[in-house]
Image (tube, rainbow, N blue to C red):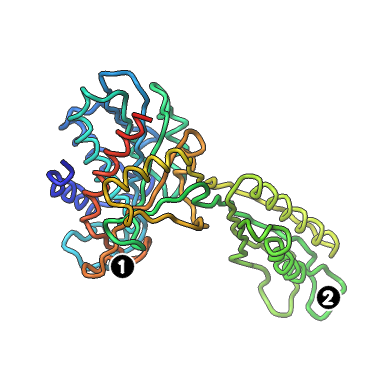
Amino acid sequence: MAEQISDEVISIRRDFHMNPELGGNEFRTMDKICEYLDLWGVEYKSNVADTGVVAIIRGNKKGKTIGIRADMDALPIKEEANIEYKSLIDGKMHACGHDGHVAIALGAAKILKSMGPNLNGNIKFFFQPAEETIGGAERMIRGGCLKDPDVDYVIGLHIDTDIPTGTIGIKYGKMKASSDEITIIIKGESTHGAHPHKGIDPIFIASNLVMSLQSIVSRNISPTNSALFTIGSIHGGTKGNVIPEEVVMNGILRTLDEDTRKFMKNRIKSIIENITRGLGGNSKIIINESYGSLINDDDVVNAIRTVANRVLGNENVIIIEFPSMGTEDFSYFARSVKSCFYNLGCRNEEKNAIYPAHSSKFIIDEDCLKIGVMLQVENALELLNM
């Protein structure tokens, strides 16, 4: 049936692509999703986490409840792809494939609705806002999307131009990193550059910190584990002959599990406080926690792998060996219930679908949409019977 509704799913995706909305402002996207759900008689609740939608298809038989997540926000990027359905909103585009995620979930909802009377359980759909910004998944969960009825498993996918259309990439265990934004404020004592001994140089302190902080991963983290800490900006001073009073540094921490995350933050704080104090200055550290690490459940991965082997063939199922240090707010679902997030291939060099996500020239091979619909339907049915 996915083949039969392929043109409709493509049309739905192109409409969303031409009308991109940034995180927290997906009002038209929300309304269009609701229009389709109304058309197909699917029960739903809108305005979840402001612009999200939670839909449910209730089976006539008691059983598990499966969640299917689709993020729906666009990016503040000017589209440069030469396509007939190019973004109509200057400076905004679906450069990460979320328009395709929504279209796939809607296609799956239409098919599963037709199966409703025969389902031994329920299927929920989470049309989620703000994946690219403030973490819409966490806000939807706080709003109760995993309750009433309680969700047993959640599945999600991401369109991927790194692997060809007709394939998927799946990862056991750790798949994506956590993220913490770190601001370091170094306070010294300003003085003339000709008399450095009369002040405390925060630039000198910051220089020592950069070198010392870079040693944490190489000397405190096991070679078989992964962590990443980057200082991306340093600001201090106004003139070459004046030692400033303050230097501000901004960095990012990425880790793959909570133990390593906790250790890295404590080690960063310790190094900053001790080196700054030892060189006569003072420090302030501000840590803004972002998304947690995304860790797939092996049992759910096995179920998705079983379906993909059956639907696509073993040769088209790629087992991802190493995790990505990128982030994904599906991690909030994976932290709450057993889940699996996987990559859906959409690369096609003949169609110029070769550019990475977040590129202004990002294009997908739309043949991946019907494959995504078919997989999500089959995945949901497989999980209902686990």
Q: Callout 2: few (<14), some (14-19), or many (20+) C-alpha neighbours within 10 Å? A: some
Q: Quadrant of residue 225?
A: bottom right
Inspect the image, locate mark 1, and give the three-letter code of the amino acid beneath it. Ile
Q: Position of residue 3 (x, y in %)?
A: 15, 46
Residue where numbered disc 2 is placed:
196
Tell me which label, 2 or 1, sits earlier in the chain.
Answer: 2
Is there any visible trace of residue 244 in the rendered image?
A: no
Q: Are marks 2 and 1 in contact (CB under 8 Å)?
A: no
| Residue placed most toward the observer, 22 or 294 | 294
Query: Could you say whether the residue bearing mark 1 is in a helix, strand or loop?
Result: loop
| Residue placed most toward the observer, 12 or 119 | 119
| Residue placed most toward the observer, 211 or 345 | 345
Query: Could you say whether the residue bearing mark 2 is in a helix, strand or loop?
Result: helix
**Image quadrant for the C terminus?**
top left
Residue located at (62% from left, 45% from top): 258
Residue where numbered disc 1 is placed:
354
**Image quadrant for the N terminus?**
top left
Drawn side of residue 45 relative to residue 289, left or right:
left
Drawn side of residue 310 relative to residue 242, left or right:
left
Camera-side mark, 2 or 1:
1
Q: Callout 1: few (<14), some (14-19), or many (20+) C-alpha neighbours within 10 Å? A: many
Drawn side of residue 112 relative to residue 238, left or right:
left
Q: Position of residue 248 (x, y in %)?
A: 66, 62
| Residue placed most toward the observer, 97 or 49 | 97
Inspect the image, locate mark 2, and give the three-letter code of the amino acid beneath it. Pro
